[in-house]
Image: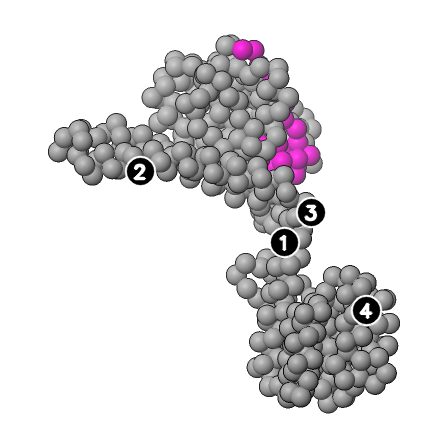
Amino acid sequence: MATLQVLVVDDEPGIRSGINRILASYTVGFPFMEEDFEFSLIDAATGEEAIEILNNQPIDIVLLDNKLPGMDGMEVLAYIKNQKFDLDVMMITSYASLELAIKATRDGAYNFMPKPFTPQELRSSIDNVSKHLYLKRMTRKMQEEGKQIRFQFLSVMSHELKSPINAVEGYLKMMQEKQFGDKVDDYDKMIDRSLARLRGMRNLIMDLLDLTKIESGKKQRKLRDTNLSDIAQMAMDTMEPYAIQRSVRMKLSVIGSSMLLSDPDEMEIVFNNLISNAVKYNIDGGKVNVSIEDNRNEIIIKVTDTGIGISKEDQEQIFEDFVRIKNNQTKEITGSGLGLSITKKMLAQYNGTIEVSSVADEGTTFTVKIPKQ
């Protein structure tokens, strides 16, 4: 649970102690927030005391009375604005000072709360100011760190989701209008294509979720002794229907132990990405060989295909986010451009590495090395 530091600035001891009692065990949470907030409160009886506190420790929320001895609340608000502190201010004012409180919101205060207030009114106000502070900080973080990522994200999403949606919509309209007959069998090809498009959309969404969890550091890892051979076989079984359609033969070989202390879900993502690529970018009638070798201090995984290969130029960028190989041989192959990027980031959590070697029109080998310790 995160803690927000709240500075209560009021010359009335009863107000300060009342706010402390009301918020002492109060928490705020919203579905879009990663964790709930609790509150740690600090008191100041004067504006001068408040400024000293602000200068010496981080504060998230200021509950600021306007009528203070010496420096008044508006002067404190002006100081906060000039210093550009990363916090939100909520004015506390009597009903007679409502006009002044409204002016304060124009001068930088988030909101105001008139005296006298009930515990429920205070909690409601704290809910709102906490939510506003959280969203403001998240927005700024995205603006500072994620402009390019957001642009890439939106570009990929708009392209990758628009195309299949348009295709499925077109097929459904043709079926609705019975353009090719009254029998369901007349539309088998359209149904198959629609299902393939929907699978592609689902895979894109799952890839984006995996990427988000890795980037945010919020993915909960469950490490245990994992049989990589079982995980690899599961990934091959998943791809088997598509491999059969392409007449692609898959083979798994294990040398020594295939046990590794790891998160099975993460290893499943690694094998799924590598094996699905080996089948998708293969030739009809091709082969996929998966090997797992216990090499003393590390596990070596190799996934080799007899497919279309990857050019030297493409090999240098295939592990970057949203990168897809685009040529005449790949134009009909769906993908998010995130699989290999996610795989590399996943392996980095184990101090693992992934390398690629490839020859155009002959095939590709991905080599993964994961230290045992």
- Name the spot of residue 209 as percent of width and height, x first: 52, 44
| Mark toward the start of the polypeptide (1 vs 4) | 4
- Name the spot of residue 329 as percent of width and height, x first: 45, 16
The verdict on residue 269 being magenta is: no
> Mark 3 sits on what residue?
144
Relative horizontal placement of residue 319, taking residue 69 as reference (left or right): left
Answer above or below: position of 86 versus 161.
below
Marks 1 and 3, Cα distance to the nearest angstrom? 9 Å
> Mark 1 sits on what residue?
139
> Mark 2 sits on what residue?
169
Query: Dot 2 lies on which element?
Result: helix
> Mark 4 sits on what residue?
79
Say which of marks 2 and 4 sits in front.
Answer: 4
The magenta segment: 341-360
Q: Identify residue type, mark 1.
A: Thr
| Mark toward the start of the polypeptide (2 vs 1) | 1
